Amino acid sequence: MVPSAPDIRTVSEEEFPQWFRALRAGFLHSREVSEEEIRVRRDGVIPERVLGAFEPDGRCAATFRTLPQRLTVPGGARVASLAVTNVTVLPTHRRRGLLTRMMRKALVEGKERGDVCSTLDAAEYPIYGRYGYGPATWTTEWAVDAAHAGLDPRRSRPDEEGARIDLVDAEEFRARGAELHERVCALPDRQGMTDRTERWWKLSTGEIGWPGRDSTRPFRALYRDADGRPQGLLTFTTDENWEHNAPRVNARVRDLIAATSAAERALWHFLLSLDWVATVHSGPRAPDSLLPLVLPDPRAARVTTHTDFLWLRPLDVPALLAARAYPVSGSLVLELADPMGLSGGRFLLEASPDGADCVPTTRSADLSMGVGALGSLYLGDESASRLRELGSLVEERPGAAALADVLLRTARRPWAPDEF
């Protein structure tokens, strides 16, 4: 007798503790969790967006969750995205199509809801291409030797006249930081950033927590311009490292965003000028961050991590392509193949600096690719010409890949600072 396939369904309140334990086991963490942590975790999810695969006896074999998200696209517009997270399949149930079934259900519901794309942070690179996702942003981390950076600690004040940096408490940081983050997300060159909910800020500042969660209390700083308006924020922790009876403190950045380059330069200078700090660990940054070139000696910074981060999958191709900005005028016909059968077809993009339209068409294609390749191109980081060389894109009309690069690539690389 062939055993019944696990049932894919929305997780009930009674099933959530088992679902959460299965999630932990899927990521090779202990299934032992406190009731308080389960309660806090449950309070942070949208119940109808929590999926599980359940055996007939009620055991949870796989987990999947989505949340609403606003994604900044080139030009500063923000689009509705289906953010995918908490994806696991227990080792005892892999290679049975459970993830495919959960993914299809979530993507169909997201498209019906009006989400124009889907995003995720891929724990494993090979998995998500088969569902139409492509890597859209990359992230880089540096370790900076403060003593060799070449900065003069006697000149650690901001360059802007009247500007200042203040250490603030969690309450002020949350209030001022949330408003600043909204402004930064709306800037035209911050593509890849996503919104931060009220719950995100409460978790970040420790108002919400649970036993076992990292309780290290960070320092929080705001950069204010001459009018007193916050233009940058910084959160960092320090350790108690001493060597040969001398302080060799590590400062680790948890969060640094800025609305102006002056604010970002000042915050890096402030952090690297702190007495006792020997090494500054930058945390995830855009690959073309002001680091390390903001330093008089950029060789003081060494790359410790460079990897893909945010993956993007188109759901509503016309709406997605019409939402972003384009530097010049041009038209392209894109033939898109979708492994999930949701967003494929042939589309005409008519773009200009004044706006864009995208509609289905029967015209001959200029470029042919999978929707995952479009996901990689969309935020401006990837090159159509490189994808052509890789065999991930077919140029049906000579010069179309070069035109796509002119239309789609951005002056600054996209960056997604937040996990979700």
Image: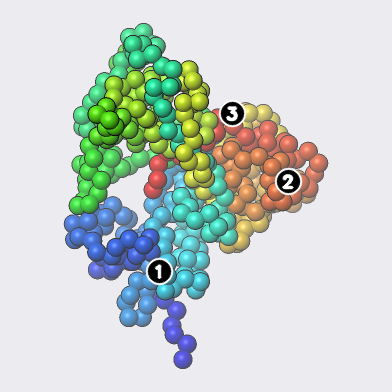
Residue nearer the viewer, 255 or 81:
255
What mark, if any, has residue 90 been given in the picture?
1
Report the residue marked by disc 3.
411
In the image, which is nearer the foreground, mark 1 or mark 3?
Answer: 1
Q: Residue furthest bottom?
A: 1
User: In the rendered image, is residue 39 in sight?
Assistant: no
Q: Is residue 262 left or right of residue 129?
A: left
Residue 260 versus residue 334 in the image, above or below? above
Q: CA distance from mark 3 to mark 2?
A: 22 Å
* Label 1 or label 3, whichever comes before in sequence order: 1
Which residue occupies 58% across, 47% down?
A: 375
- In primary-sequence order, the first of circles 3 and 2 is 2
Q: Are marks 2 and 1 in contact (CB under 8 Å)?
A: no
Depth check: give the residue in front, 302 or 247.
247
Number of other residues with Cα within 10 Å of mark 3, as a class: few under 14, some 14 to 19, many 20 or more: few
Q: How is the rendered protein coloured?
A: rainbow
Question: Which residue was labeled with disc 2?
Answer: 389
Q: Is residue 76 left or right of residue 275?
A: right
Give the Cα separation between the discs numbered 2 and 1: 38 Å
Q: Amino acid at mark 1?
A: Leu
Q: Earlier in the sequence, mark 2 or mark 1?
A: 1
Label 2: element kind: helix
Residue type, mark 2 in image: Glu
Q: Is residue 252 visible?
A: yes
User: Residue 342's x, y, as percent?
Assistant: 58, 59
Q: Looking at the image, is mark 3 or mark 2 nearer the viewer? A: 2
